[in-house]
Each structure stands twice: as structure tokens, then as C-alpha cells.
């Protein structure tokens, strides 16, 4: 099976979020970047498991500048076979999806996997857009995936439960918790990653449909109102009369 | 502008989050001098369909031929309806169905999308929508530059407002193409518990509770309040609680009116999933727990002493209210 895993770069979960240029740009100074956790823990690891049991190849794909290469090497160290970077300074999810679809159209991938969303833009859009552009089945928020002779058996989250469904390959699947367990790259993987192919391809020139005009930070919380544990009932009273939420 | 709202249903009833999306869409249409319509699908009771009218919608398109949540077929249905209604803005709820169908629709309609919007658009210079980014640690104003626009609204962002009116429900069954997925089985999470993403009130607990056997009081407090239950990630990872209760940066993000956190330290990754909550209450033995910095109300105390008192107080309040 020929699997494409889309990998995004994201600031480490503990990063302090600071903006510059009049609140129009995320300030990357001192920020540690990681592979977007959903892409890495769920999409990539499940792809590797499917390859290990059924054979095939796992290609990772990122759309971005040279600054993406460290996290791509990390994904190769975890076990992907090769990498493609579309050299592009993308601005929105439509542009990213168009670039990925352009690559996917000229390669016969059986599965396109990616995380359910990124932890920076939290868009949850790219997978569905690729499916829309390719006219492939799309299953989002999948927590299980098995493949049997060209049919994917998938479990996806839905309101109040889950749903078991089947989709013919090729298809696009956005992966969530349950899919797989995080893998830590070992020394051999890290060494091997250095010599695995990382091909840079040119952008297809797709344009963006949206732009971020400005960022803001949430208002600082006022200080917490502490209630004496002996008088815990007072809390319920305050929630009722002051906060008016119950 | 003409607005089309995609309304999902559960168990034959229009979803609660859909009424909020309908409130949102009908206000935008009204303020801009356009008309609003609703598109829905599946087996839905006529009472529930008619209820849409009370949120300012007169025009309801109902597709009864599709019953499975097949994102490709629904995106085709939506494209047909948006052509029919000459829609300039499509509104979804940013729930599981919205996350599946909205991006495909955007690609099909060549439309820019803002997913997870938390407020009404700003239209003085173009069309700009606010959304949470960096897992709730910041907000972005995102401008949509395409002619047709798609917005998916994060549940619990603008509330729902009732007005007067009667709905005109039309059957709408265009060609939606062959199915792209086949649904084999539905698994309910069990219990009659309130759905976490739609809940107004949430009671959550973490490792401070010491073991799964101690969740009885958390469930009782939730039941008395009419709240959903949630938990921190380690608690779901060690199997004390089901995975679907895990909130945070790597779990689900919620924004209830009230979030009560018991025995949770308030790590940055946990806060990322709950910092959109309107009121946060923290119960923790450690006065230095980081969660207190994000809280509106706090009790420095032992959960095993405090929670039973809270249960009694809620019961007393309910009696006092009759
Ligand atoms: C990449 C990444 C992603 C993550 N994503 C998430 C996520 O999505 N969601 C999430 O929750 N975590 C996430 N985490 C984990 C997070 O960093 C914390 O480890 C976790 O939230 C801690 O859970 P906790 O508060 O239940 O446990 P602890 O940190 O162990 O805190 C327990 C708390 O209970 C208090 N306590 C103890 N006894 C009592 C008592 N009797 N009464 C009252 N209070 C008591 C203690 O004072 C303490 O504050 C993530 C971590 C990483 C690295």
C-alpha cells in the first residue's frame, strides 16, 4: 500500500504565544517547533503500522519553507520512507490542500492520512478540502482504521458515540485519538533519517481564499475569588446569584 | 447577503448546536438585507423541523433521501441547495458533521472558509470573522476574500434567540451522486449523559481523585446540576474514564458556561481545551495549582470533603427554587 501522510509543523504545546508586527504575525523567536501531534501520533504511526503488516511505502508531505525540514527529519526518524516538501509560503488551508492535491494527483496513493487538526490554526479543514479537490471519500475524526483488500474499515467519532463505516480506497482520513500510540524515534531511526530522500518540489501556484488580519490575546482573568472549604455551599450560591450560570 | 445554514439532526431532532447556527445565519441575513434558508437531511420529526421557524427561518429545505452522514454526498447536496438559494454565505456548526462536510463544500464551491468562528462577522471592511487559534491561547480575525463564503460556528459561541414565525418546509432531493462511504454500525457511548461538546455545564475531574472508584460523587454532582462529565488526559490514558471525556489540547475543546475542575492541576495543555469556558471553578488541595490563575472561583480544599458539600448545596438550591 502506498500511503501519504501530511505533516504540519506546530509550536510546542507549552509555547508562549506572542505576536509582533502590530499583532499580525506569530513571533517564532524562541519557539520550539514539533510535528503537529495529531499528524505524528495518530496519522503517521498508523500508516507505519499498516505498512508493517501489509507492506508498501509511507511518504510524508509538508507544504512550507526550508524551516520545515527538522520536523520532517523527525517524521523520517519515526519510520517514514521518504519525504516531499512543497516549497511554498502558504497562507490558508485552501492553498495547502491545493498543493497536496497537486502532488497526490500525480502519484497513486491508496490512502491520504493526516491529523484531525493542527494545534496552532485549529482549522480541521485540509483533509476535507483534499477530498473535495480529488473527489475521494473523506472520513474525519477517525479513531480506528483497518484495510482489507482495497476497502478501509473505519471508526469515526460522531455526536454521542462512534460509527463504523467502510470506504473504498483511495480515500482521505483525518486521524484522532485511538488510532495509534505515540512512537519515540530510536537512535537507529534518527541515523537512518539523515540519508532518506527529502525531495523539494515547486509550488503549483494555488492562491489563498482567506487571510489573518490580526491576532489578539484573551483578556487577563481577574483574580480568583476564593471560598472557604468549610463554607463550600457559598460557592453554589455565588454561581447562582452572582455568576448566574446555574 | 443570502445565507444557507446546514442544520444537523440527532435521533430525529434538529441538533441544539444547529439552532445556534440558525440564529447566527438568520441574524446575518437580516442585518445585510438578505434571506436565510436552512438545509437539513435525514429522518426528522415535523415538530422539530417546524421549530426552525422560531429562529427566524421561513425557508427549510429537507432532504429525506440521504440518511447516512456521507460527507461527499452531503457536500453535493449543499452545493445544489446553495445554487438553488443563490447563497453567498454557508453556515455550519463546527461539530463532527460540520468538520466533515464544510471543508469539502468549501473546495467544491471555491469558497474561503473560517472554521470554529466564535462571533458574528465584522463587515465594515470586507468580511472578517473571529476564531480561536493556538488551541484557545489566542484569537485571530480572519478575512474571507472569496465571493461565496463558508463559516462554521463553534458551539456555545453566540447562543440562540427565538422569534416568531412559521416554517415552510420543502422536500429537496437533488442528485447527490453515489455513496462514498457505507455506514455499518452505530455505537452509542452509553448512558443518558449529556453530550460534552453541547453541554452548558461541565463537571470535570483529574488525577487528584486517586482512582476510578471515586467518580461517583463527580457523577452525582453532574447529575444534580444537569451537567456533562469530563476528565484530564492522564485519567483517560490510564483508563479511569472513557477517552471521549478527555478535554484539552489533544482531547476535545469545550466552551461551556460553567466548568468545574476537581483535582486537576491546570497544565497548559489542559487549559487549552477549556479556556473558552465562561466561568471556571477550581477545587484543589494545592493553593499553588496553576489552575487557580485561570479560575473565576476557587476552593483550596480536599475534593472528598468539598464535593459532597457542593452536592448538598445544589440539592438545597433546587428545593429552594421549587
Ligand atoms: C503534548 C501534550 C499534550 C497534552 N494534552 C493534554 C490534554 O489534552 N488534556 C490534559 O488534560 N492534559 C494534557 N496533557 C497532560 C498535561 O500536561 C498534564 O500532565 C495533565 O493535564 C495533568 O492531569 P491532572 O491535572 O489530572 O493530574 P496532575 O497534574 O497529577 O494533578 C492532580 C491535581 O489534583 C490535586 N489533588 C490531589 N489530591 C486532591 C484532593 N484530594 N482534592 C483536590 N485536589 C487534589 C493536586 O494538587 C494536583 O493539582 C498533555 C501533555 C503533553 C506533553
Image: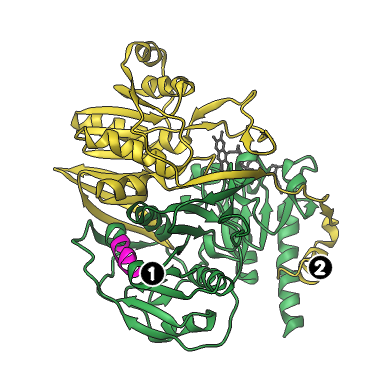
Please count the marks in the image.
Answer: 2
Task: Indicate the chain on which mark 1 is placed.
Answer: B
Residue B148 is situated, as x and y percent measured from the top left of the image, at 43, 59
Q: Which chain is yellow?
A: A
Q: Residue at x 28, y 57 (%)?
A: B72
Q: Label 2, on which residue?
A: A242
Instruction: Judge by depth and name the residue closer to the eye, B108 or B318.
Output: B108
Residue B207 shows up from this direction: no
Q: Are marks 1 and 2 on the same chain?
A: no
**Range of the magenta residues?**
B74-81
Q: Main secondary structure of the magenta part?
A: helix
Q: Which color is chain B depicted in?
A: green
Q: Residue at x 77, y 42 (%)?
A: B286
Left or right of A105? Residue A94 is right
Q: Label 1, on which residue?
A: B86
Q: Residues within 10 Å of mark 1 (few under 14, many from 20)?
A: some
Q: Look at the numbered disc 2 and give the secondary structure of its residue.
A: loop
Residue at far left of view: A149
Q: Is residue A3 above or below residue B15?
A: above
Task: Indicate the chain on which mark 2 is placed.
Answer: A
Left or right of B153? Residue A42 is left
Image quadrant assignment for residue A12: top right
Q: How far apart are labels 1 and 2 at the CA level?
A: 46 Å
Amino acid at each position: 500500500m502506498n500511503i501519504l501522510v501530511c505533516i504540519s509543523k506546530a509550536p510546542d504545546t507549552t509555547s508562549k504565544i506572542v505576536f509582533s508586527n502590530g499583532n499580525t504575525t506569530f513571533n517564532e523567536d524562541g519557539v520550539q517547533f514539533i510535528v503537529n501531534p495529531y499528524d505524528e501520533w495518530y496519522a503517521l504511526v498508523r500508516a507505519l503500522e499498516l505498512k508493517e503488516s501489509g507492506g508498501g511505502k509511507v511518504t510524508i508531505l509538508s507544504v512550507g519553507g526550508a524551516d520545515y525540514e527538522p520536523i520532517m527529519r523527525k517524521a523520517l526518524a519515526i519510520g517514514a520512507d521518504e519525504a516531499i516538501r512543497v516549497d511554498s509560503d502558504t497562507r490558508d488551508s485552501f492553498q495547502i490542500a491545493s498543493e497536496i492535491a497537486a502532488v497526490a494527483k500525480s502519484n497513486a496513493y491508496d490512502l491520504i492520512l493526516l491529523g484531525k487538526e493542527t494545534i496552532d490554526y485549529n482549522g480541521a479543514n485540509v483533509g476535507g478540502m483534499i477530498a473535495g479537490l480529488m473527489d475521494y471519500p473523506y472520513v474525519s475524526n477517525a479513531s480506528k482504521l483497518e484495510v482489507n483488500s482495497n476497502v478501509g474499515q473505519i471508526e469515526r467519532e460522531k455526536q454521542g458515540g462512534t460509527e463504523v463505516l467502510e470506504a473504498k480506497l483511495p480515500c482521505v482520513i483525518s486521524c484522532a485519538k485511538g488510532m495509534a500510540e505515540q512512537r519515540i524515534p530510536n537512535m537507529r531511526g534518527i541515523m537512518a533519517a539523515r540519508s532518506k530522500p527529502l525531495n523539494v518540489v515547486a509550488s503549483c501556484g494555488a492562491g489563498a481564499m482567506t487571510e489573518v488580519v490580526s491576532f489578539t490575546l484573551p483578556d487577563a482573568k481577574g483574580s480568583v475569588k476564593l471560598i472557604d472549604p468549610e463554607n463550600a455551599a457559598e460557592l453554589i450560591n455565588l454561581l447562582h446569584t452572582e455568576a448566574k450560570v446555574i | 447577503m443570502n445565507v444557507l445554514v446546514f442544520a444537523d439532526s440527532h435521533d430525529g431532532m434538529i441538533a441544539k448546536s444547529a439552532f445556534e447556527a440558525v440564529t447566527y445565519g438568520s441574524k446575518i441575513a437580516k442585518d445585510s438585507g438578505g434571506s436565510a434558508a436552512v438545509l437539513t437531511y435525514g429522518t426528522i420529526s415535523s415538530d422539530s423541523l417546524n421549530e426552525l421557524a422560531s429562529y427566524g427561518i421561513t425557508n427549510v429545505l429537507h432532504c429525506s433521501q440521504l440518511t447516512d452522514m456521507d460527507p461527499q454526498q452531503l457536500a453535493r447536496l449543499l452545493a445544489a441547495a446553495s445554487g438553488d438559494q443563490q447563497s453567498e454565505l454557508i453556515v455550519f456548526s463546527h461539530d463532527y458533521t460540520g468538520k466533515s462536510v464544510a471543508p469539502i463544500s468549501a473546495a467544491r464551491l471555491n469558497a474561503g472558509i473560517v472554521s470554529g468562528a466564535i462571533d458574528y462577522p465584522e463587515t465594515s471592511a470586507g468580511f472578517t470573522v473571529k476564531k480561536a487559534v493556538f488551541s484557545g491561547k489566542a484569537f485571530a480575525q480572519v478575512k474571507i476574500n472569496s465571493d461565496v463564503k463558508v463559516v462554521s460556528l463553534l458551539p456555545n459561541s453566540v447562543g440562540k434567540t427565538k422569534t416568531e414565525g412559521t416554517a415552510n418546509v420543502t422536500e429537496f432531493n437533488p442528485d447527490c451522486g453515489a455513496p462514498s462511504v457505507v455506514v455499518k454500525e452505530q455505537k452509542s457511548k452509553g448512558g443518558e449523559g449529556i453530550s460534552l461538546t453541547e453541554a452548558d455545564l461541565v463537571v470535570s475531574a483529574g488525577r487528584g481523585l486517586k482512582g476510578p472508584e471515586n467518580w461517583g460523587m463527580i457523577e452525582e454532582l453532574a447529575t444534580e446540576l444537569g451537567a456533562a462529565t469530563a476528565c484530564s488526559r492522564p485519567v483517560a490514558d490510564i483508563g479511569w474514564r472513557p477517552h471521549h471525556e478527555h478535554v484539552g489540547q489533544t482531547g476535545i475543546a469545550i466552551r461551556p458556561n460553567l466548568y468545574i475542575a476537581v483535582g486537576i492541576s491546570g497544565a497548559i495543555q489542559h487549559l487549552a481545551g477549556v479556556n473558552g469556558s465562561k466561568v471556571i471553578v477550581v477545587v484543589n488541595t494545592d493553593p499553588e495549582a496553576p489552575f487557580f490563575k485561570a479560575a473565576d472561583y476557587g476552593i483550596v480544599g480536599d475534593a472528598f470533603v468539598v464535593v459532597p458539600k457542593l452536592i448538598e448545596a445544589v440539592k438545597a438550591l433546587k428545593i429552594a427554587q421549587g
